């Protein structure tokens, strides 16, 4: 019979200690060689949050392209994690950009799609003469009877602008016609 602790490492044959010879729970962290545990040794889903110490995982520990949506905690990715320019139009959800997301003065004429500004978008008395590019508003842009006397520049109605027969007696001021206006 052997004495207690009579067998040491030099007495064991290489490869003689098999799984069945190991007592359950006998291997702790100090018994493992650094870097000994690789992907083939881990059961699917075995690495849980409670098993990971804060700051314990380095880039070298993670296989490339192995972290997916299911592995990330909600709201775990913030601005410092995103590369500049990485959020493209395709990445934005439809309807995700409210007015509060836009910086003041962010939208200029180059950003507005042709034909998109409608009457309901324009604040009352917001358009001034200096806002309009010369010859940019045509007959198709104006509503019927939208131009009134206050909109007309003084002296802008010339003879050519008057339709033939448009000036009747009710349009003339009393005493407006004098001798010089009378044809021979």
Image: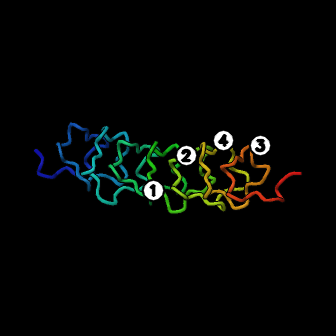
Q: CA distance from mark 2 to mark 3?
A: 34 Å
N-term mark: 2 or 4: 2
Report crowding for label 2: few under 14, some 14 to 19, many 20 or more residues within 10 A (C-alpha). few
> Would you call the spot at circle 1 few (<14 residues within 10 Å), some (14-19), or many (20 or more)?
few
Label 4 packing within 10 angstroms: few (<14), some (14-19), many (20+): few
Disc with the residue nearer the chain's start (2 vs 3)? 2
SS class of the residue under badge 2? Answer: loop
Asked if marks 4 and 3 touch (Cβ < 8 Å), the reply is: no
The residue under label 1 is 101
Residue 160 spot, x, y in % from top left: 79, 49
In this view, the mark in front (2 or 4): 4
126 left or right of 11 in image: right
Among numbered discs 2 and 1, the one appearing first in the sequence = 1
Asked whether 168 or 14 is in front, the reply is 168
Which residue occupies the foreground of this view, 28 or 126?
A: 126
Find the distance from the CA under tag 2 to the CA under tag 1. Answer: 23 Å
> Which mark identifies residue 140?
4
The residue at 32%/43% (across/down) is: 14
Say what secondary structure mark 4 lies in: helix
């Amino acid at each position: 019979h052997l004495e207690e602790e009579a067998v040491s490492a030099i007495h064991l044959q290489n490869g003689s200690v098999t799984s069945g010879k190991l007592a359950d729970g006998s291997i702790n962290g100090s018994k493992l060689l650094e870097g000994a545990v690789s992907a083939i040794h881990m059961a699917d889903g075995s690495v849980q949050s409670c098993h990971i110490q804060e700051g314990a995982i380095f880039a070298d520990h993670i296989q490339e392209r192995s972290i997916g949506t299911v592995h990330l905690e909600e709201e775990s990715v913030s601005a410092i994690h995103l590369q500049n320019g990485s959020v493209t139009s395709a990445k934005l959800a439809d309807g995700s950009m409210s007015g509060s997301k836009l910086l003041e003065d962010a939208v200029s004429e180059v950003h507005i799609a042709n034909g998109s500004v409608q009457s309901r978008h324009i604040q009352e008395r917001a358009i001034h003469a200096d806002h309009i590019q010369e010859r940019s508003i045509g007959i198709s842009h104006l509503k019927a009877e939208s131009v009134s006397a206050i909109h007309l520049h003084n002296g802008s109605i010339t003879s050519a602008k008057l339709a033939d027969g448009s000036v009747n007696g009710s349009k003339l001021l009393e005493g407006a016609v004098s001798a010089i206006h009378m044809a021979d």
